[in-house]
Amino acid sequence: MLRTEGIVLNEIRFKETSKILNIYTKKFGRINVMARGAYRPKSKLIAHTQPFSYNEYQLYKGRNFYYINEGAVIESFYSIREKMERVIYGFYILELVNKSTPEEEKNEVLFLLLEKGLRVLSQLDDGFLKFIIAFELKYMSFLGYRPFIQKCVSCGNKDFSNIKFSIHGGGIICNDCFAVDAKAKPMNRLMYESMVKLLYVSLDDLSSIDISKDILIKVQEIVEDYILFNIDRGEFNSLNLLKSINY
């Protein structure tokens, strides 16, 4: 028997009454878990097999899946479901983690960021775009892809009077290096300063930062392309719905 804390990323119905879950765990990273009988009306597994729920599990490992022996809810994050924006941003966070992490590779820092992100989101009433960019930048940093923004990623120049963001290069390039990446994204000083602030600010302190929606949208477009490039994905299904609300 194995014990670990975990957060449910998604669920797939299996046969009539069971679920296959993707759970991001504190001890084992992302794992596939079979929840037998979870769709039965009186199942004891209902509460701790819901997306967003943060639980303590007792598991045993089979040939193809982990199996839930028992579980206990630590935090349901039910308030995320009480507001449409929270739900959509929440499902994007879960999809991001699900699509960008390898199976059974422990990363406790990512787990703690996921738990913190859902906790902050569950109380959020506005500033959702600012929140998600801050989360994305921190998430990519902990995944090993922190954007290089202290100086030009190509030559080391610290003159930021005219810069772009190189998706392929992984950071800022200066005017002298524009030829290095013809597809680099335009970035003005406000966009750059906003990215720096959102990278380093605590998720609890986002209200202390004031950034216009226009700048946030432009920064989010760069961050989205950066994420998709580094995790080798074409798009996020939940992000398409998210854009229909904010853009």
Image (cartoon, helix red, strand yellow):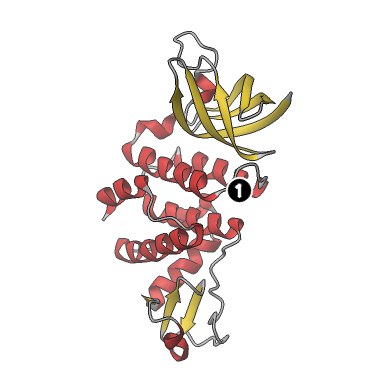
Q: Residue reaching furthest top?
A: 42
x and y, in percent, of residue 118 in the image: 50, 40
Residue for point 38% across, 50% down:
236
Q: Quadrant of the C terminus?
A: bottom left
Q: Could one spot residue 127 in this view of the protein?
A: no
Determine the residue positioned at 35% across, 46% down: 237
**Front-most of residues 174 and 121:** 174
State whether residue 37 appears in this view: yes
- 51 vs 164: above or below: above
Q: Is residue 125 left or right of residue 202?
A: left
Snapshot quadrant of residue 130: bottom left
Quadrant holding the N terminus: top right
**Which residue lies at the image location 55% right of the left edge and 79% below the top edge?**
153
Q: Is residue 95 above or below residue 212?
A: above
When asked about the image quadrant of residue 187, the answer is: bottom left
Position of residue 238 measured from the top left corner of the image (x, y, whole percent): 36, 45
In depth, the one of 88 and 121 nearer the eye is 88
**What residue sits right under mark 1 in the picture?**
110
**Residue 185: x %, y % from top left:** 38, 74
From the viewer's side, name the closer residue of 49 and 88.
49
User: SS class of the residue under badge 1?
Assistant: helix
**Crowd band around label 1 with a 10 angstrom C-alpha radius: few (<14), some (14–19), many (20+):** many
Looking at the picture, tell me which residue is in the foreground, 85 or 55: 55
- In this picture, residue 112 sits left or right of residue 15: right
Q: Residue furthest bottom?
A: 176
* Residue name at image x 49 percent, y 77 percent: 172
